Amino acid sequence: MLDLSAISVVDNHCHPVLLLQQMDVKQFRRYFTEASDTSFAEKHAPNTVYYLWMLRQLAQFHGCERTEGAVLAARNSLSGEVLQQRLFTAANIDTLVLDVALPSPESSYSAEQMSQFGGCRTAKMLRLETLMQGLILASGDFDEVVEQYTQEISDLRARGYCALKSIAAYRTGLQIAEWSKDEAVISFKEARAEAVRAGKLRIAHKPLIDYLLHIAFQKAAEQHMPIQFHTGYGDGDTDMRLGNPLHLRDMLERSDYQTMQVVLLHESYPYSQLGAYLAAIYPNVYFDLSYTIPFVDKLEMLAFTRQALSITPASKLMYSSDGTNLPEMHWAGALRGRSVIAQVLQEMIEADELDEEQAYGLARLVLRDTAYEVYKL
Ligand SMILES: [Zn+2]
């Protein structure tokens, strides 16, 4: 079997971990489901294959019994700092590319701290919908919001960002249309009224989101900046029908956007073949292979990894964990990613599709080198 443990990973899509790492079973389980119903985690998380796998791996890591209680006690006895130190070092991480908007910065370790504890590099991306929400809360003037927004997404590298990210799939869908300014203003007024009424805003106003996204596409293309899109399986509130990456066609066809790299997150699961296809056809589309979230077990990971490597050049594929809240997730992603990619490449060697040297070359691209190029690390 190929051994990929020496290849350090660039985790091209993940999130910060929480400051408060000491937690009870109820809370721990909650981080292992995307279901929004709070009773779901308690009742069903312990009966999912990936959760049982995680407990066994952690038991081995901590040298304890594989019961939930023993694993929890072992991890809770360590500080967040030590936990990150041990897990990230064991995971052999080169760089974490972080979406620092979630969990909230007040409740999580900063990118700088994670870098220091983990002995790895961190890079940051800017989540567009969070930026939009903040600006709409702050001002009732459409032109002012657009101006401020445009400024915030100019000169991104100088501001410390290596990518943009959009969660439009979770809100209004990936069929990002072109709207007139008048239509965007009407939509803005609705969003603003909601923001004023509630004192907060969850932006889900399609003409407004789409209008602001097109501004971001122009700015990203100008700066040769990548943008990540959530596609397929993600938050529990997503309308999965609208998360099919084929909806991105109009944007992908725009000739003036070709210098913006588009990264399809979450292997577009369960639209994995479709997402992999887009990365095989469009020069500026890249495909993310995520090995902790979405929560699926190894057999499904083997399936989407086979599809991706069968359809798409490895120089268009990038590893991630989508680890969030718990440092165990970033660690588990790296373990899983290496082992699944190794197994699939081994199958390809046995099928006489590749030789071993070629297989290692492709593994290095997926685990690290493609991301280096896309994010200019
Ligand atoms: Zn994410």
Image (tube, rainbow, N blue to C red):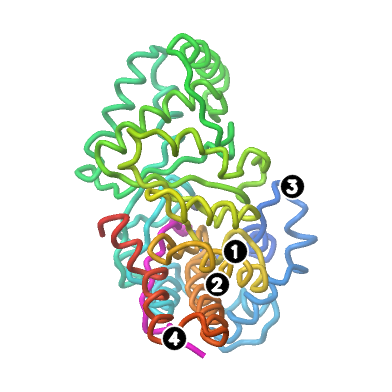
Q: Examine the image and state in which quarter residue 198 appears.
A: top right
Q: Residues within 10 Å of mark 2 (few under 14, many from 20)?
A: some
| Residue 41 quadrant | bottom right
Residue 298 shown left or right of residue 161 in the figure: right
Disc 4 marks a residue whose amino acid type is Asp
Q: Residues in magenta? A: 1-19
Mark 1 and 2 residues: CB-CB less than 8 Å, in contact? yes
Q: Secondary structure at mark 1?
A: loop
213 on left or right of 329: left
Q: Height in image: 289 above or below 199?
A: below
- Between 303 and 77, the one lying in front of the other is 303
Within the image, what quadrant is residue 239 found in? top right
Q: Nearer the viewer, residue 178 or 135?
A: 178
Residue tagged 4: 355
The residue labelled by disc 1 is 23
Please tell me whether mark 2 or mark 4 is closer to you in this view: 4
Kindly state the secondary structure of the residue where label 3 is placed. Answer: loop
Place of residue 205 in the rendered image (x, y in percent of width and height, measured from the top left): 56, 23
